[in-house]
Image (cartoon, rainbow, N blue to C red):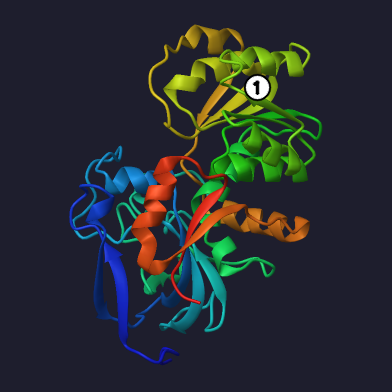
Amino acid sequence: MKPLIASTFMQAYHIPRATGIEALTLTGSHVPTPERGQVLVHMHAASLNYRDLMIVEGRAARGAPPENLIPLSDGAGLVIAVGPEVTRFKPGDRVAACFMQSWVGGPLSAEDGASALGGALDGVLAEYRLFDHQGLVRLPEHLSFEQGATLPCAAVTAWNALFGGQPLSPGDSVLVLGTGGVSVFALQFAVAAGFRVIATSSSDEKLDVMRHLGADHGVNYRRHPEWQEEVLRLTNGDGVARVVEVGGTGTLARSILATRLGGEIGMIGALTTGGEINPTTAMRRNLILRGIYVGSRQMFEAMNRAISAHRIEPVIDRVFPFAAAAEAYRHLKSQTHLGKVVIRISE
């Protein structure tokens, strides 16, 4: 089937070398044609994660990205053409790309880890993009492309943190650290599931927003540097059943102390450094420390069913035009945002 586009020319951002945000380079090329098992998507929006900032600055855990990488893992758009033997999609479908293109379900494999968009593979900051049809999901009908573009990494990560480990029960307490994309999604999913949520932030204004979204309590960690003590006080000394731990080594020790006996910590990010971790504390509290690397397509699809059922709408801080992609990166780096930073690629 011929692509339903008026032009065969497209633009995409590349990172010739990971030397910083200023390295982002807009280049032109021909729109590709889908081959066997492939889907051509007209990208409408993309969103940023902290990982994307680390990649463009050459600080990614896996080392320098491939030269001329197209960045960003999270994007949504419209299917405009499919190749032979594509059965999952048709032109006109609204879709989002999976963070790891080959991880359909089950345990994460090394091969799946090597299929991450915007890192090992070219990402989505382009007007058109080819995907394997196994690496896409349909968007919930009530979401815009901008909202849908926020889902693949942050939302699936939050979903995995809450529902991919030992089961939680309505009324259980969940602690979310900060007000970035993962933490806000975790709050929204936890509220929908009937969990009690405690949120932390350095900003009372951001904590007010988190309460408006359904958080039961907010803890300002500048006012309460030993914020785990506040969490214990708010849970009658028991601690929370689950921590969505995005901070890393600088916050993990306090997260361990804030977790109830037999609870679980979803270890996601590395936004902070320093701090001494004593594994004996976790051992004696019988805790599960579970590393989380986003999630599978099956998790994405389950999450989308919940988003549709509860009419959950992602929280977007700002939307930048395609020409201002570098400005979007700088806004993310400022850490003044609440929720997701989005780039509108096309109307």
Specify whether 123 is left or right of 107: left
Q: Residue at x 70, y 34 (%)?
A: 167
Q: Is residue 31 visible?
A: no
- State the residue position of label 1: 263
For mark 1, does the 10 Å Cα neighbourhood hold few (<14), some (14 to 19), or many (20 or more) residues? many
**Which of the pair 64/16 is nearer the observer?**
16
Q: Is residue 190 above or below residue 315?
A: above
Residue 228 placement: quadrant: top right
Q: Position of residue 70 (x, y in %)?
A: 30, 61
Q: Position of residue 37 (x, y in %)?
A: 41, 75
- Going by the numbered disc 1, the residue's amino acid type is Gly
Q: Is residue 227 above or below residue 37?
A: above
**Which of the pair 119/49 is nearer the observer?**
49
Q: Is residue 62 above or below residue 216?
A: below
Q: Residue at x 47, y 83 (%)?
A: 80
Q: Is residue 315 above or below residue 255?
A: below
Q: Is residue 10 visible?
A: yes
Q: Position of residue 337 (x, y in %)?
A: 52, 45
Q: Position of residue 34 (x, y in %)?
A: 36, 80
